[in-house]
Amino acid sequence: MPNPRTVTLPGSHVAERIEALTPGSVAEVTDGYVVLEPASMLEAMRAIRDDAQLDGKFLAQMCSVDMITRIDVVYHFSSLAQNHMFESRSRPTTSGPSWRRSRRCGLARGSRSARSTT
């Protein structure tokens, strides 16, 4: 009986495939994951979904990691057809529309509504 264990793709393989389809969209590569450039995030995500080798049509999990000086958004993709998984990350900039929107909503560090009122 074959081993049904899911394989985790190395970051270098994932980066190679993404770069082949959307050059310049990979900011950093590690053994376990690839960091995507925020400016080309949409194109990179489409490449992940549409590439026959990555086949990242299933977003298994999305979470964030607070690194004190920055926040990484982490995406775990799975290919059910090819029985593999891989991780990509993005490091959103602290400027631009999403950052301004979070400040208005009181989610940014130091905003009045983010502080405790007790």
Image (spheres, grey):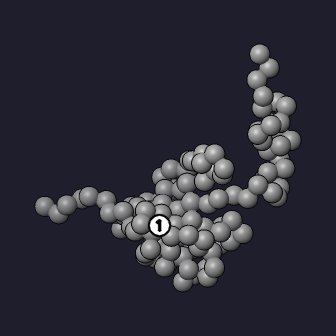
Q: Which part of the image, by quadrant, shows the N terminus?
A: bottom left
Residue 8 position within the rendered picture, expressed as x and y whole percent measured from the top left: 36, 62
Q: Which part of the image, by quadrant, shows the C terminus?
A: top right
Query: Which residue appears farthest toward the front when viewing the image?
Result: 69
Q: How many marks?
A: 1
Give the quarter of the image for residue 4. bottom left
- What residue is drawn where x is 85% and y is 31%? 112
Q: Secondary structure at mark 1?
A: loop
- What residue is drawn where x is 69% and y is 65%? 38
The answer to whether one can see residue 81 in this image is: no
- What residue is drawn where x is 48% and y is 63%? 33
Residue 22 position within the rendered picture, expressed as x and y whole percent measured from the top left: 61, 79
Give the quarter of the image for residue 80. bottom left
Q: Is residue 35 left or right of residue 110?
A: left
Query: Above or below — where is 40 with respect to 23?
Result: above
Query: Which residue appears farthest toward the top when viewing the image?
Result: 118
State the residue position of label 1: 30
Which one is nearer the viewer's eye here, 65 or 19?
A: 65
Q: Is residue 107 left or right of residue 48?
A: right
Which one is nearer the viewer's eye here, 91 or 1?
A: 91
At label 1, the amino acid type is Thr
Query: Above or below — where is 35 with respect to 109?
Result: below
Residue 55 position within the rendered picture, expressed as x and y whole percent measured from the top left: 46, 69
Q: Is residue 77 left or right of residue 113?
A: left
Q: Residues within 10 Å of mark 1 (few under 14, many from 20)?
A: few
The answer to whether one can see residue 27 in this image is: yes
Residue 9 position within the rendered picture, expressed as x and y whole percent measured from the top left: 39, 67
- What residue is drawn where x is 43% and y is 75%? 13
